[in-house]
Image (cartoon, helix red, strand yellow):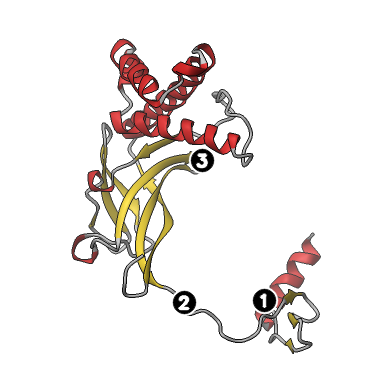
Amino acid sequence: MSDRGLETRQFGHRARLALSPALAVKADDQAHAARTMWNLLHAWWQMMPKEKRTLANADAAIRQARQDIDFLAVLPAQAAQAVLKTYFQAWKSCWAGRADTPNFKARFRSTLTVDVPQGRDLNIVRVHRRWGMASLPKIGRVRFRWTKELPVGKQAGEGYRITGARLVKDALGWHIAFRVQTLERVPEAHQGPQVGIDVGITVPLALSDGETYEHGEWLTSREQARLLGLEQRA
């Protein structure tokens, strides 16, 4: 938080990637390698004595695995480090009681993901009103749908920048989720008394002091006609 009443905020923005078949295969290979890295790391964790389950030992094991197993070499080094960081964070969340014990990731029940920890590696450029381009390690230059203003070029700064990204594959294909850091003004603390708010349908807002707030028409006449048609069809 800065001295000018600004604080750092993080938010994400997800955009669809337009990958050629060859680039999609590269992304798939990296995601499967990342899943395998997680599973090998989990097996290593279970096999090692407690006193040797350290971040340094795990990092050394990952580096050795990437040298010995060609399949894992397709995963960029920074993405492999991100797997290690996520795995250790999963154990910390488990110990704090916020999550279950980490487990192996099944091939067909886990989401394919690849992390790009460093935002500077992306080299994002807007090339069209609807398209942007980014560089992905060991994949190449790719296009993505530009649906939201992003801090690139002259718009980027120390307080407003992209800090990284993650590739995610779902039923519609590959997407890229950008991690964006921004500075926002800290809202001033409310000086008046506290009040409870109850949200409803008949009465949209009811306050604990007895005051209520009404809402306008929920649907326009056109929306009501469309809803009626859908109900009749059902």
Q: What is the x, y in percent for residue 145?
A: 36, 55
Asked whether the beta carbons under mark 2 and mark 3 sit within 8 Å of each other, the answer is: no
Q: Residue furthest left?
A: 154
Crowding around mark 1 (Cα neighbors within 10 Å: few <14, some 14 to 19, many 20+) is: few
Please name the residue that numbered disc 2 is placed on.
Answer: 187
**Mark carried by residue 223:** 1
Residue depicted at x 31% and y 23%: 74
User: Alpha carbon of mark 1 to alpha carbon of mark 2: how far?
Assistant: 36 Å
**Mark carried by residue 170:** 3
Q: Nearer the viewer, residue 67 or 233?
A: 67
Q: Nearer the viewer, residue 120 or 9?
A: 9
Residue depicted at x 23% and y 43%: 121
Nearest to viewer (mark 3 / mark 1): 3
Residue 112 in the figure: left or right of residue 68:
right
Nearest to viewer (mark 1 / mark 2): 2
Q: Nearer the viewer, residue 8 or 189?
A: 189
The quadrant where residue 225 appears: bottom right
The quadrant where residue 13 appears: bottom left
